[in-house]
Amino acid sequence: MNGVILLVLIVGLGVIAWATTRMRALGFRRRTGGRVRSLPHHHGWYVALWTAAPPLIFLAFWAATSPALVTDMVLGTPAAGRLPPPGFERAAILSEARALAAGQAHGAFHTLSRTLAPAYATAQTRIDWIATAIVLLLALAGGAYAYLRVRPDFSARTRIERVVLGLLLGASLIAILTTAGIVASLLYEAGRFFAVVPITDFLFGAHWSPQVIDPRDPGASLGAVPLFWGTFFIGAVIAMAVAIPFGLMSAIYLTQYAQPRARRIMKPVLEVLAGIPTVVYGYFAALIVAPAVRQFAVSIGIEWASSESALAAGLVMGVMIIPFVSSMADDSLAAVPDSMRDGSLAMGATPSETITRVMLPAALPGVVGGVLLAVSRAIGETMIVVMAASGVATLTANPFASTTTVTRQIVDLLTGEAEFDSPKTLAAFALGLTLFVITLLLNIIALSVVKRYRETYE
Amino acid sequence: MTRRLRRRYAAERRFRLIGMAAVALSAAFLAFLLITMVAQGIGGFTQTRVTLPVDLAAADLPVEPARLKGRGADLALAGAGLEHAVDGAATQAFGADGTDLLSPGAWIVVRDAIKADPALLRGTTRFSLPVASAYDVAAKGEGTPEAEALVTRLKARGVLSTGWNLTFLTDADATDPTRVGIWGAAKGSLLTMLVTLALAFPIGVLAALYLEEYAPKNRWTDLIEVSINNLAAVPSIIFGLLGLAVFLGTFGLPRSAPLVGGLTLALMTMPVIVIAGRNAIKAVPPSIRDAALAIGASRVQVIFHHVLPLALPGILTGTIIGMARALGETAPLLMIGMRAFIAAPPQGLTDPATVLPVQIFLWSDQVDRGFIEKTSAAIIVLLVFLLAMNGLAIYLRNRFETRW
């Protein structure tokens, strides 16, 4: 029997357990005149859980261990004596035989696998029957144990609720598991990278050309400084030069000046900018903005302007970040107490003087926190730079020249044809680790700035 | 004194104007982007066709009408030299460049017509066939001079027409821009979203319930909280690296599969749902919990019978917004190998598949000019989906917003 049928069987047994126990519990209710510790369906769930959970847990373990058991049984048969010694060929023959036995393959490359296939089929059938027997035994034992405990004074509800609590706790632990998974996988792969390439070469080297790696000194062509600079230049300089003035002024206008009606319409319109997928921005940047920027550069007399300029990618990224900056600025302006604004206006200051000299300084920590979060988002942004920025790492402060970024390089390194263990692919994980650490630091600083600031006015 | 006042008022007006300009420019950029995409992409939904008489009787195809029924029909017609018959007819009708004029997939239209009506084999029929990409672009106004010249000649003869391009909505990726479609990518997106929703929604809601209703204030729950807030701000490409290292590397799941894409996006979407869920749960007034507890309900009953139903509209709004974000995500899916050329819609969760944003990315790299309008057309479809989802979220928020 295969896994699906076993699952259906277990669920079916669970339903039967639920229904019979509920009937029995309804019976107590009539006999004792309703003086029962738990509702009938609580009893039902209690027994159903005891019926279904142990076999399910067993199946999860079984799924992980049974292939090895099957292989062991096959290796015990006489035909297995002719197998080559452990290695790639042996594994290939065994997996072919398994596919043949399961009916997934029609022909086989090795003749030996055809001889082994029947052995596989018998072993698999035997293992499946063992699994079925254990599942039935566990379900019946668990169900019977629970069914016998169900009495009028048995508090099934508390027990059920303990299980529910466990489920809730488990769900929230997944967040920690994910974070741990990210950190562990990045650290592991980056560790393998740093075993080959010295960490100082990676962090301080100024030459990046992963296409040609010298096996004797891989660190010489894997210096990431140009990438860090390019990321900073596009994400934190050019993009912010667009996003901060536009975002801040939009927030000021919409919160302080605009009619409520205009605000109601314009705020969602700006938010649409944040909802557009980044691949669309990237396409727009590559198709429309990059040629326009190049033309502009040529028209002001720069002949060698690149069509993959830092400016094109940065401009579009800045527009994408506008709603983000404006909503953070909006929040922090709204948190400034009205009395401060009213005081300034009452002294005769114009609204713009009030905003620039009273409200903005008061809201500054919040605005700065918002800008830091925006920077963190910009340097982690991938598709715009993959489509509009260049793949060539150069150390330049000229916005019309081409630069590359960390995220663009991660995509380039991992979508090529390189094998999984080369320093080239592992370098992507080292870059990912750097990106993760930097955005994590930015987020933590930004969130603590915003939090501390909010507390002072409450 | 008045001069100074006038200066201050002028500064005030200037400041206000700058603010207005910032809002207007941002909105103008949005409008420019949307209008450009629609202008570029609207042509992707139509197709230029040329009317071509094909004399199938004269071509004398070696096809037995008996084999035209059922599953062998495609095979029988593919081997019968139908392509040559169509090419011959084109050369006869339009001269030496007649063969180039037709789309490489034009004969498929003829094949499908014959399948529907085998009687066509016995006479001459006027077919309306798609033209090749270069002439399609020329007919829509931006082709090479030679192509434009031919198109003008054909227009004068009255054999060109424009019709809806239904294959764009029903087919999968192809190498020729006149034959590409988005259905394969749309189906991939749908399967991926199903996996994402099935994992992220229950886990996110349960985690939000735990953190809001149960969690004691201690170091562990602080750690959970910090990791959730942090996960929401981790760059999406990092999730792609996680998917690559863990799901593909450690667990050995298949590359390019909606299952892995959905798992990766679920990890990314879950924190969004948790944060939205916590806010919705926090908004349920304590009096409701107290009332239920007072008449003897247990904590679990309070949560699942009272708090959760009241918080559900808020949770759903957050879920839809998170799903919309996941639907538009590209970078993590590139990492797990969803950038292959896949010409058939996926049949299951473990089949190789692509998704709409990745399809857009792949088409944007194509040199053929015909792909520009297809890319923009696919963007229009994606944006329509996203706007619909966000609209639904706003509607839900307005419809079920309760003030206690």
Image: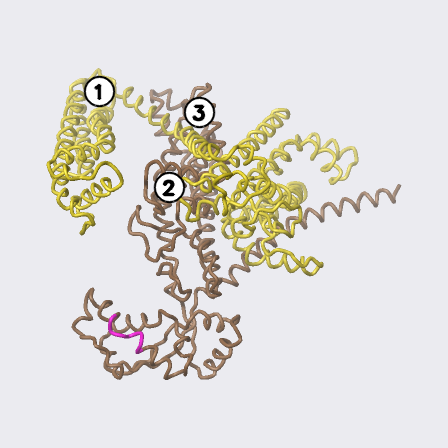
Chain colours: A yellow, B brown
1 and 3 marks in contact (CB < 8 Å)? no
Q: Which residue is mark 3?
A: B287
Q: Which residue is mark 2?
A: B196
Tell us which disc is closer to us: 1 or 2. 2
- Give the vertical position of B306 relative to A243 (above or below): above
Where residue A212 appears, as percent x and y from the top left, is: 50, 47
Tell us which disc is closer to us: 3 or 2. 2
Where residue B361 appears, as percent x and y from the top left, is: 46, 53
Label 2 chain ID: B
Find the magenta span and give its range: B79-85
Asked if marks 3 and 2 fall on the same chain, the answer is: yes
Where residue B240 appears, as percent x and y from the top left, is: 43, 41
- Give the vertical position of B361 relative to A145 (above or below): below
Give the alpha-carbon distance from disc 1 to disc 3, as whole Å. 29 Å
Considering depth in this image, is A295 or A47 the residue closer to the camera? A295
Residue lying at 73% horizontally and 39% vertically, measured from the top left: A351
Q: Residues within 10 Å of mark 3 (few under 14, many from 20)?
A: few
Name which residue type carries label 1. Answer: Gly
1 and 2 marks in contact (CB < 8 Å)? no
Q: Which residue is mark 1?
A: A34
Q: Is residue A90 left or right of residue A371?
A: left
3 and 2 marks in contact (CB < 8 Å)? no
